[in-house]
Image (spheres, grey):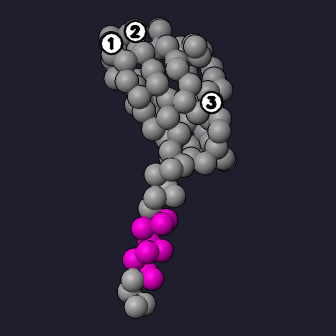
Amino acid sequence: MKIKIILSSLAFLFIANIASAFTIKYYNKDSKNYTMEVKSNGSTQKVEFNSSTSGATSIQTSASEVEIKTACGWVKVKNDAKITIKDGCIKVE
């Protein structure tokens, strides 16, 4: 019985972590991969954008907005935002 409760608790925590993923849809017009620094809730992490493609990337955070460091400075991006990357800079659609 105790094992069932522990496993249920772990499963709940795992699902809660997945639910808190922050998603950014992007189109990278450059023929270069970018790894950019992301700030959210006082912590930083890295996010990768593949070259010459569109896609989506996830960031583990409970925040509704993050800041991404680009060649043109810091850009605020909201959850589920669509962005375009050109010359290392981000434009929020």
Residue lying at 50% horizontally and 45% vertically, measured from the top left = 21
Res. 51 image quadrant = top left
Residue lying at 67% horizontally and 47% vertically, measured from the top left = 42
Q: Nearer the viewer, residue 30 or 62?
A: 62
The label on residue 52 is 1
Q: Could you tell me the amino acid type at mark 1?
A: Ser
Q: Mark 2 and mark 1 in contact? Answer it, CB < 8 Å.
A: yes
In the image, the segment drawn in magenta is 5-13
Q: Mark 3 and mark 1 in contact? Answer it, CB < 8 Å.
A: no
Label 2 or label 1, whichever comes before in sequence order = 2
Res. 50 image quadrant = top left
Query: Which percent across, then down, holds residue 35?
Result: 42, 29
Q: Could you tell me the amino acid type at mark 2?
A: Lys
Q: Mark 2 and mark 3 in contact? Answer it, CB < 8 Å.
A: no
55 vs 16, left or right, is: left
Q: Disc 2 marks which residue?
A: 29
The label on residue 78 is 3
Q: Nearer the viewer, residue 60 or 51?
A: 60
Label 1 element class: loop
Answer whether residue 16 is visible to the viewer in this image.
yes
Residue lying at 51% horizontally and 50% vertically, measured from the top left = 19
Query: Which percent across, then down, holds residue 72?
Result: 59, 15
Marks 3/1: CA distance? 23 Å
The outermost residue toward the bottom is: 1
Label 3 element class: strand
Label 3 or label 1, whichever comes before in sequence order = 1
Label 2 or label 3, whichever comes before in sequence order = 2
Give the number of marks: 3
The reply to whether the magenta stretch includes residue 26 is no
